[in-house]
Amino acid sequence: MKFGKSAISIIFLSIFNNALCSELQNETYSLFFESPSFIFSTKNQKVQIDGKNSQLLSNDIYFIANPAVTIKRGDAVVDIDSSEAKYFQDLQKLEFLDSVNFYISNEENSLDIRTEELFVDIKKAMMNSKKKTVTIFDNIEVTSIGMNLTYFDRGYNADFAKADIQIKSKELEHSGYANEISMISKDNELIMKGNAYLYKDGFKISADLIHYNFKNNKIIRSVNSTIQSNS
């Protein structure tokens, strides 16, 4: 069994002595561990994966019940938990299945995501989901069918597919839709592309592309736009 850089807080006792290993090679078997903890560093990231229990499915694939993952990269901190997950140790990938809660924060803002699946590539600092995803950041909520996110030392970029958006500003609430909504955290900006529209301040703004600054609550650019009154 290869553990690479991982430090797994499990006592294997004498299960790997030569005689027993020779016998087990001819058997179909699984290894179960209570309260596993995988701790390692890679690509300027510190990673810790804990769980209620785990099962070794193959040489480098673990099934983990009630996983809780923390990834630290620069100022960014990623926390993920779900009902179950698979950890691909050699590939440094995670597949979260069922009731996934994902939270990422840095010094300036945070992002809170709920979905039913999440695929994480630790080496590339990327994650995605192809199922319904609800994302909340600042005063904005995005409900989408699919999400791709890349996190950096000081922020993250996220893309949402077929996304509905709600923006709450003081006593006002704006809403809209786009085939794709991209969020760039360092610029405090949303980019709405494809059949994009936004109901704001009593008007419906429709455009091929809308740039919206969510910190200042302002549309800063639009392409091929039309404006209609809601009344």
Image: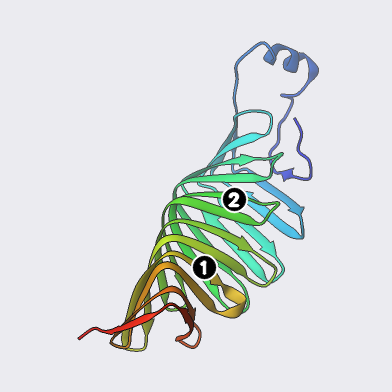
Q: Which mark is residue 182?
A: 1
Dot 1: within a 10 Å radius of its alpha carbon, few (fewer than 14), some, or many (20 or more) residues?
Answer: many
Q: Residue at x 64, y 45 (%)?
A: 93
Camera sees residue 165: no
Earlier residue among tags 1 and 2: 2
Q: Secondary structure at mark 1?
A: strand
Residue 56 lies, with reference to residue 158, above or below; the image says above
**Residue 231 falls left or right of residue 53:** left
Which amino acid type is shown beneath numbered disc 1?
A: Ser
Dot 2: within a 10 Å radius of its alpha carbon, few (fewer than 14), some, or many (20 or more) residues?
Answer: some
Residue placed most toward the observer, 68 or 13: 68
**Residue 120 falls left or right of residue 217:** right
Q: Residue at x 68, y 29 (%)?
A: 59
Residue 18, image x, y percentages: 80, 17
Q: Residue at x 70, y 64 (%)?
A: 73
Residue 45, image x, y percentages: 73, 59
The quarter of the image holding the N terminus is top right
Residue placed most toward the observer, 36 or 85: 85
Q: Which mark is residue 120?
A: 2
